[in-house]
């Protein structure tokens, strides 16, 4: 099973994500659940990598992706939108394949 833990700040902006495991919905290379989760997470990382005002530190390995995100005022709206898209996509996968993918989203107060 893939387990995904996401933390958002008080404004609803994604600040951290940790995804680990394998769905095992099919054999390697044919697993649509793993593919969907991987594409969503890797696309998020690619579009935020060089975005002004967005700072993302990531660790990626086979079966594991984790990142922490920070932002300046310039990157706030972009990170809100990118994170909202990521969470919606991951929740959609989890709802369609609950036996292979579980997502938990929490809010945390940052900078207090």
Image (cartoon, rainbow, N blue to C red):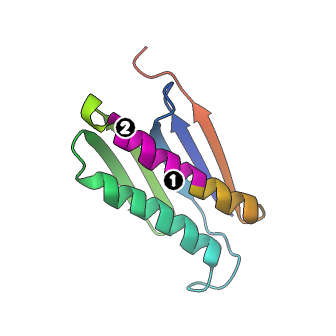
Residue drawn at point x = 72 percent, y = 66 percent: 100
Q: How many marks?
A: 2
Contact between marks 2 and 1 (CB within 8 A): the answer is: no
Q: Main secondary structure of the magenta part?
A: helix
Q: Is residue 63 visible?
A: no
Q: Which mark is residue 24?
A: none
Q: Position of residue 112 (x, y in %)?
A: 43, 13
Q: Which residue is mark 2?
A: 77
Q: Which residue is mark 1?
A: 86
The secondary structure type at the circle numbered 2 is helix
Q: Position of residue 10 (x, y in %)?
A: 51, 24
Residue drawn at point x = 47 percent, y = 60 percent: 41
Q: Quadrant of the image for the N terminus?
A: bottom right
- Residue 54, relative to residue 91: is it above or below? above
- Crowding around mark 1 (Cα neighbors within 10 Å: few <14, some 14 to 19, many 20+) is some
The secondary structure type at the circle numbered 1 is helix
How far apart are the alpha carbons under marks 2 and 1? Answer: 14 Å
Residue drawn at point x = 36 percent, y = 52 percent: 58
Q: Between residue 23 and residue 45, name the one nearer to us.
A: 45
From which residue to which does the magenta span run?
Answer: 76-88
Residue drawn at point x = 62 percent, y = 69 percent: 22
- Residue 69, relative to residue 31: is it above or below? above
**Which circle, 2 or 1, is nearer the viewer?**
2
Q: Position of residue 6 (x, y in %)?
A: 55, 43
Q: Position of residue 93 (x, y in %)?
A: 66, 62
């Amino acid at each position: 099973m893939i387990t995904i833990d996401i933390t958002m700040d008080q404004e609803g902006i994604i600040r951290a994500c940790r995804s680990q495991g394998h769905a095992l919905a099919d054999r390697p290379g044919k697993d649509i659940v793993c593919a969907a989760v991987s594409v969503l997470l890797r696309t998020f990382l690619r579009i935020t990598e060089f975005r002004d005002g967005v700072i993302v530190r990531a660790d990626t390995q086979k079966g594991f992706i984790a990142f922490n995100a920070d932002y300046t005022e310039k990157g706030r709206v972009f990170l809100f939108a990118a994170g909202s898209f990521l969470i919606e996509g991951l929740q959609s996968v989890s709802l369609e394949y609950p036996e292979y993918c579980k997502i938990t989203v929490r809010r945390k107060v940052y900078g207090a």
